[in-house]
Image (spheres, rainbow, N blue to C red):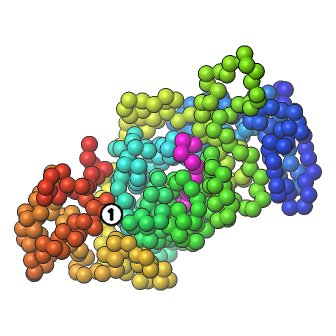
Amino acid sequence: MKDVREYVLRTPPGGVKRYDHDALCDLLEVEDRSRVIFEQGVAREAIVRIYPANPLMNMREISADDLLMDERGRITLGTYYDGAPLRFRLFDPKTGNAQRGAIFGTTGAGKSRLGQAILVACKRSGIVVHLADLKEGQSVPEAKGQVATRVTSQYETILMLRGLVAEAHRRMKDYGKLGRSGFVIGDPDPLTYGIVDEANRLLEQKAPFRDEAAWLIKELGRTGRSVGVGIIILAQAGHLDELGGSDTLRAMLKEGEVILLRWSSEMMQQLVGDGLIPRGEALQPIQKVVGQVRRVRRYHEVAPDDEDDVNSQGMLYHLTGSRPTSMARTYIVGSVAPCPGYDPLILDLYGDQPPPGEGINLMAYVSDKELKALADSDDGEGPTGPAGSAAATAVAADPGPSTAPKSLAERILAVLPPEGMTAPDLMVKLDADGHSPRPVRRGTLNTTISTMRKENRLARPDGTGLVRPAPTATDD
């Protein structure tokens, strides 16, 4: 490229373990830190390039063709600083494996737009998606009607993940009978993904379904990939405590497709400490404001109006790709400015065709009894951990036939109309539902309702004595 200076450096055995980008820029006498790119190779070499302007600043809009999966199971999300395409693998045709993915980044780094691109790619590539948007549906609102399943609460996410685990086990049994060790797309099953946006809300400490969620995601990572059921999570941090406290889950995600967007210094320490980034790995920092030159201004100098505008959304490192220390950036996904409603550019990317798997009722796929059987056949690390959530306790209890609601909480959800009802009327409904020979006690009902509200399974009352279901993905 014209006007680009390049230096090839010899590095010590094992590469550069400590890297100070500011010191390097000072040595090269470059004020704009974003113009200097450092990349380390594996043959005791490193390259330093100085660009006239940051090469990732002017990105084009993403296209539907970029997001159509190629013959090697990859989509194109953006570009590296040197123009090479940034690819993300959704399927490995050589092994027949779906992928396990994790996308990390601080608030405002571009996770949601990257998630939209992956969702569009799945729809256009015939991949069935079951989506949990745990920011009350706000992270990727345009996905409504574009995926097979869309849920917005933690409780619904647990049901969705249970269904995905059940589907993976069903495929394992069927493929075993066929003598098949790998997955072939569409023969007879479609490639399927569970995607959880804002997964830290589901997996952080004190989250109501944390233990079961961690087990279900781990189970999908272990058993789903070989039968075409993948899992992708998007979260603000990669610390073990934010991933359900599961070392196995963290290690599983590390072997998949891991992308790191702009991070905080604390997040980087956590990622390194948890092994998602090798210790000593040299990553050039991604600043909130790219191209800013920090210097003391004289009294008559005026700073530009846009000097403090954040402009690094979408800049990232593909940590499990072939170039983990090379900075890249996604193409522009959707409108640059916020829209008053659904983004028309994103809707155009999705297209008008119905989503693959439309009509699948995944959340009704598996019962508590069936899930407990899966856990009992596991290695003893099922969803009933020492600090088991209320959902995990309900799974372990298994108090009745698998075709009907078992716990009082499930019976409440089954009989409650959308507009709600008073507690006395609810007691009458429960006594008549045929699931227990004994009437429901008022004290037991009140305790259960209180617990369900704490777990976000019921909304707060609108009036005295009114019980109302929590909003779901189907509510407008």
Amino acid on which disc 1 is placed: Glu
Residue placed most toward the observer, 81 or 212: 212
> Can you say whether 381 is above or below 171 in the image?
below
Q: Is residue 61 left or right of residue 277?
A: left
Question: Is residue 313 a member of the stretch shown in magenta?
Answer: no
Question: Is residue 106 a member of the stretch shown in magenta?
Answer: yes
> Can you say whether 152 is above or below 159 in the image?
above
* Residue occupying image coordinates x 51% and y 53%: 234
Q: Assign the N terminus to one quadrant of the image.
A: top right
- Name the image quarter holding residue 300: top right
Residue 151 location in percent, x, y?
35, 53
Residue 245 location in percent, x, y?
53, 70
* Residue occupying image coordinates x 40% and y 40%: 142
For the image shown, how many numbered marks are present on the structure? 1
Q: Is residue 55 left or right of residue 378?
A: right
Residue 160 location in percent, x, y?
37, 61
- Name the image quarter holding residue 253: bottom right
Inspect this view and state whether residue 174 appears: no
Q: Residues within 10 Å of mark 1 (few under 14, many from 20)?
A: some
Which residue is disc 1 drawn over? 455
Q: Assign the C terminus to one quadrant of the image.
A: top left
> Can you say whether 83 is above or below 435 in the image?
above
Residue range in magenta is 98-109
* Residue occupying image coordinates x 34% and y 72%: 390
* Residue occupying image coordinates x 84% and y 26%: 3
